[in-house]
Image: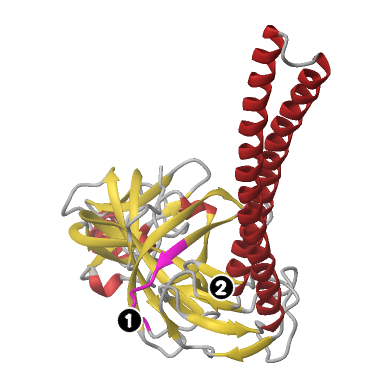
Amino acid sequence: MIRSFHAIAPAHLLLAAALTLAPLAARAQDVGPKPPMVSVVAAEKRSMVAKVAVTGSIVAREEILVSPEIENLRIIEILVEEGDRVEKGQTLARLSRETLETELAQLEAAQARLTAGIAQARSQITQAEASRVEASAALQRSQSLRQTGNASQELLDQRTATARTAQARVGAAQDGVRVAEAQRAEMEAQIRDVRIRLGRTEVKAPAAGIVSRRTAKLGAQTANSAEPLFRLIADGALDVSGDIPESRFAQVKLGQSAEIQLPDGQSVTGSVRLLSPMVNTSTRLGSVRIALPPTAPALMGNFARGTIQVAQKTALAVPTAALLFGATKTTVQVAKDGRVETRTVRVGIRAGGLAEIVQGVAEGEWIIAKAGTFLRNGDRIRTQETPLDAALVGDEATLGSGN
């Protein structure tokens, strides 16, 4: 009996040991590596404003070049300075008039002589016409007498010649008047030209504006080929002449609102006025003109930077940090049932650290806030819910083009 007890005892001990170690083994498995903890945010509707950055300089919307319309005259008076506001037709400078006034006096004197000559020529026409009438009457009498035999052929020939001479004198006198009148008309044209040139001795503003530059100097001689005497900002209107990367240029439209920062820190609101029809092939930039309000405290040449509002909408949004950009697609990592689910999405606008999800995610789904390659589709995870605003990174004022 004792033998049999000793033989059976080890079997009981083995069974007891197995029953004791089984829970310990299970607990050992439970204390293995835990899934990583990740922050997740809910995809939710947000009001989004997409913007495009622009940098450039302040320029005149339209610059007016004021040059002298007459050459070789001295500048004798300058009436405006840089910064002055001028009206259309206002005199900016005066040129010397002495030479032109002398020329005008000479022409007017010559015109007076021509007028007197025309009057004299017309009186000669009257005298020649009277002589012609008298000669014609004498010829008719001689012709009648010749028919009756009371006048010689010689007398008839003489009076015929006299009548023809009188007629020729009338024609010559009339031609003289016509020539004199043509000379007077030419003289009048010369007088008008001198008077026009005299009017141009006052250099006037062709339009209202602000004097941005004055190169006119007292005593200087005018020349059409020289630098303009004045430069005006038409109506004082200023633009920002800026550049935009070609990847964003197509999203900018005429009339869109722009917020411009000036060098003194002030901000003004303008609007897109002009868009270049082409992109610079060297810089890959497109040019834009933004109209500034008349009250903008800006100066020509100032540096300016700002943003153009290109889109505004309420859209389903996730943090831009949640996006993974591949060569052919954009994805997000969705937290579902404790595992990672990688989804292809189509992205719309991006602004303020948010990206619009056009397709691929439903409202309320939990998205891993910061996507990374360390997580793969199907990986087990633990999640920590984070408010969307707390997960935002940066301020991307751009327009998305996701796939």
Q: Is residue 342 visible?
A: no
Residue 77: numbered disc: none
Q: Position of residue 48 (x, y in %)?
A: 25, 61
Horizontal side of 59 relative to 121 (left or right) equals left
Residue picked out by circle 2 = 199
Q: Position of residue 183 (x, y in %)?
A: 69, 52
Question: For residue 264, which quarter of the picture?
Answer: bottom left
The verdict on residue 127 being magenta is no
Q: Residue at x 58, y 90 (%)?
A: 78
Please name the colour scheme applied to the rendered image. secondary structure
Quadrant where the N terminus is found in the figure: bottom left
Residue 295: numbered disc: 1
Magenta stretch in the rendered image:
289-296
Horizontal side of 402 relative to 225 (left or right) equals left
Q: Amino acid at mark 1?
A: Thr
**Image height of 219 relative to 15, above or below:** below
Quadrant where the C terminus is found in the figure: top left
Q: Residue at x 58, y 67 (%)?
A: 196
Q: Amino acid at mark 2?
A: Gly
Q: CA distance from mark 1 to mark 2?
A: 36 Å
Question: For residue 10, which quarter of the picture?
Answer: bottom left
Horizontal side of 271 relative to 47 (left or right) equals right
Q: Is residue 358 visible?
A: yes
Q: Residue at x 18, y 58 (%)?
A: 44
Q: Nearer the viewer, residue 82 or 364?
A: 82
Question: For residue 372, which quarter of the picture?
Answer: bottom left
Q: Nearer the viewer, mark 1 or mark 2?
A: 2
Q: Position of residue 354 (x, y in %)?
A: 31, 63
**Image height of 403 relative to 398, above or below:** above
Query: Mark 2 falls on what kind of element?
Result: helix
Report the label total: 2
